[in-house]
Image: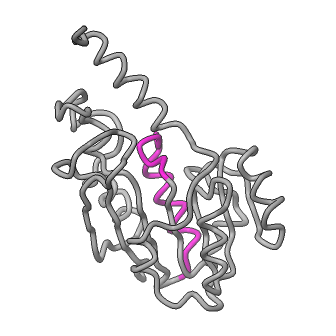
């Protein structure tokens, strides 16, 4: 039986909600991030969207003094049990607590997904800027905004200019917060990606920025 248009839309919407929902069991650092990271020995690193901590622990293994932040308490409980020497903070990345906004971090890494779930992009960017010291760096790795809006049959099921943040909005929000984008790379959808996209669809992106003096 051929799937109806209604069934395809329903399947895509259900899959979109699952993909957008926070995942407790997040993998370690993506290969693109590993290649982009420099020497982290002794650097203070803030990881937003740490999940159960695999990527955060990898940052620590590279020599960083790292703090993991996530909104999911269950995920952080698992992270604390596995890596008790790392500081884990339950907080909304869009509204970081005061103790994380004192300009002490050398690097903020926003990875692990969830960018399309932000409803206060300006607040998210301001929090990052407040957390970073002068000349501190930001590295963002996430699903490409286009991938969120295109289904497995290569059809646009959502308006690109509505809904989750676009790359232009992300760069602009960071600029308003005093962060200068130095590099923006886009990658095709990886093999086995959960949205079942082929490599003609941009699947992921990496953004590098730093905090300039005002």
Relative to residue 90, is residue 42 depicted above or below? below
Name the image quarter holding residue 212: bottom left
| Residue at screen point 26% across, 32% down | 151
Q: In the image, residue 55 lies at what x, y percent?
A: 59, 66
Residue 78 lies in the magenta-colored region:
no
Relative to residue 82, is residue 51 depicted above or below? above
Colour convention of the picture: one colour
Residue toward you, 125 or 167: 167
Q: In the image, residue 207 lies at what x, y percent?
A: 34, 67
Q: In the image, residue 175 lies at what x, y percent?
A: 34, 65
Q: In the image, residue 29 lies at what x, y percent?
A: 51, 67
Relative to residue 41, is residue 22 depicted above or below? above
| Residue at screen point 43% across, 23% down | 14
| Residue at screen point 62% across, 49% down | 25
Q: Is residue 187 left or right of residue 43?
A: left
Relative to residue 73, is residue 167 depicted above or below? below
Name the image quarter holding residue 158: top left
Determine the residue located farthest toward the front in the rendered image: 1
Name the image quarter holding residue 211: bottom left
| Residue at screen point 29% across, 77% down | 182
Q: Quadrant of the N terminus?
A: top left
Tell how many labels: 0
Q: Is residue 204 left or right of residue 155?
A: right
Specify the segment rendered in magenta.
113-133
Residue toward you, 186 or 166: 186
Q: Quadrant of the C terminus?
A: bottom left
Residue toward you, 102 or 18: 18
By secondary structure, the bulk of the magenta-drawn segment is best described as: helix
């Amino acid at each position: 039986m051929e799937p109806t248009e209604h069934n395809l839309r329903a399947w895509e919407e259900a899959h979109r909600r699952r993909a957008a929902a926070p995942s407790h069991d997040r993998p370690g650092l993506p290969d693109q991030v590993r290649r982009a990271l420099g020497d982290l020995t002794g650097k203070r690193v803030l990881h937003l969207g740490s999940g159960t901590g695999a990527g955060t622990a990898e940052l620590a293994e590279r020599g960083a003094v790292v703090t993991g932040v996530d909104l999911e308490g269950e995920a952080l409980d698992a992270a604390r049990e596995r890596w008790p020497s790392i500081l884990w903070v339950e907080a909304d990345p869009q509204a970081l607590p005061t103790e994380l906004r004192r300009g002490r971090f050398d690097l903020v890494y926003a990875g692990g997904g969830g960018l399309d779930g932000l409803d206060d992009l300006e607040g998210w960017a301001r929090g990052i800027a407040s957390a970073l010291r002068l000349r501190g760096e930001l590295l963002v790795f996430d699903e490409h905004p286009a991938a969120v809006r295109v289904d497995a049959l290569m059809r646009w099921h959502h308006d690109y200019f509505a809904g989750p943040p676009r790359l232009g909005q992300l760069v602009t929000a960071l600029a308003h917060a005093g962060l200068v984008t130095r590099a923006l790379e886009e990658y095709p959808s990886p093999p086995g990606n959960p949205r079942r996209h082929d490599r003609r669809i941009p699947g992921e992106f990496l953004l590098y920025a730093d905090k300039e003096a005002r």
